[in-house]
Amino acid sequence: SSGINAEYGEEGISAVHRCLLYLGDLARYQAETEGMNYKSISARFYHQALLICPNEGRPHNQLGTLAGSNYEGLEAAYHYMKCLSSKVPFPGAGDNLKGIFNKTVSVSKDVMCSPESYPPTRRFLICFLLLADKLSGPVSMSEVDQLVRGLGGDFADCYTDNRQPFPPALVLKIATMAIMLAENALAPGVDTVQPKLIPALVIELMTTILTVTIQQLGEKLSSPDNQFQSLQISGGVEEERSVVMLHVISTQSLLLPLKILGDWIKARHQLIAQDLTGTFWAQFGDLLNLFPHTRDLERIVKEGFSQSQQQQKIALPEDVALRGLAPLSALHNQLEFPPLSPDLNLLDEFALRLLCLK
């Protein structure tokens, strides 16, 4: 708590953090010679190191190395960007990130020449990384604007016919990268693209995810095969209907990136209010209309949300992804983060997420 005990406590935490990093490195070396099983073990050690010392960037650098060329290198780029934005960054991450961008620039030339020859998933990943590279320095407004608009269409194309082309964790990483890119551009003294383009990527991405989520969720809730629809017809008890409805909604993983994108827009509202169109707010309203009533969600959530203050109290997985980002510090300072926060079951977690979006 103070004096020598506090000093030993900090040294102990630092020692555990280093041990977890070394264990992660050893498992990563084993993965290179003995197979994929060690990759997941290595990643687990690195993530545990982050839980103990969230301000340290080095575990993210190691996770980037572990990710390699997964998803055109986007997963690695995410971790290198997280490393560089940490309070204690690892210097080598900058060169590692540049290496990813250099490969992307080389591949993107073919994509730009013949986009129709690439599937939308690969086209989106390459163009997103290309945009991330261009937003790192001065570029032309028209070039960035064209890339941003194209990304929205590519993302929507990936999800046609109710496909789920990306794992939920990857979409969360994409949303986090968009926010970090916007924050880098907003940093004092940065000479980059015109201010109007700074929030464009975040808003375009959120608008597209909103469109996809509303379509997929609306189809699931209106399907005659689900229990929610039969309860509507039979006039089931309202609270029971809300629980069944929440079960349906809990299959929609795109709500995780929507939550953090919404948190960022709320935190930066004064800077980007003029860029949020009536269409955007209409779409957001359409999504909220698909959710159970607030009072039913509050009955489901036993902990994690203060009804009197209408505030989130427990960090959700997507909050952990953006922990340490300056604009969200006011929100994060009032949250309990792992390993200290209590575990929530899936329904409680989604009910809390919906309350936050509302």
Image: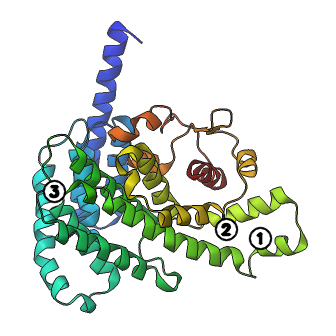
Residue for point 31% across, 73% down:
149
Q: Secondary structure at mark 1?
A: helix
Q: Secondary structure at mark 2?
A: helix
Q: Are marks 2 and 3 in contact (CB under 8 Å)?
A: no
- Indicate which label's residue lies in the foreground, 2 or 3: 3
- Location of residue 96 (image quadrant): bottom left
Q: Pick whichever, 110 or 295, lies toward us.
A: 295
Residues packed near mark 2 inside 10 Å, few (<14), some (14 to 19) or many (20 plus) = some
Residues packed near mark 1 inside 10 Å, few (<14), some (14 to 19) or many (20 plus) = many
Q: Which mark is residue 228?
A: 1
Q: Which mark is residue 136?
A: 3
Residue for point 31% across, 54% down:
42
Q: Amino acid at mark 1?
A: Phe
Residues packed near mark 3 inside 10 Å, few (<14), some (14 to 19) or many (20 plus) = some
Left or right: residue 210 compared with residue 267: right
> How many numbered circles are shown?
3
Residue for point 24% across, 44% down:
85
The answer to whether any part of residue 2 appears in the image is yes
Q: Are marks 2 and 1 in contact (CB under 8 Å)?
A: yes
**Which residue lies most toward the top here?**
3
Residue bearing the label numbered 2:
248
Q: Amino acid at mark 2?
A: Val
**Residue 150 in the image, given as x and y percentages of width and height:** 30, 77
| Whole-number angstrom distance, CA of label 2 to CA of label 1 | 8 Å
Q: Pick whichever, 332 or 182, lies toward us.
A: 182
The answer to whether any part of residue 25 appears in the image is no
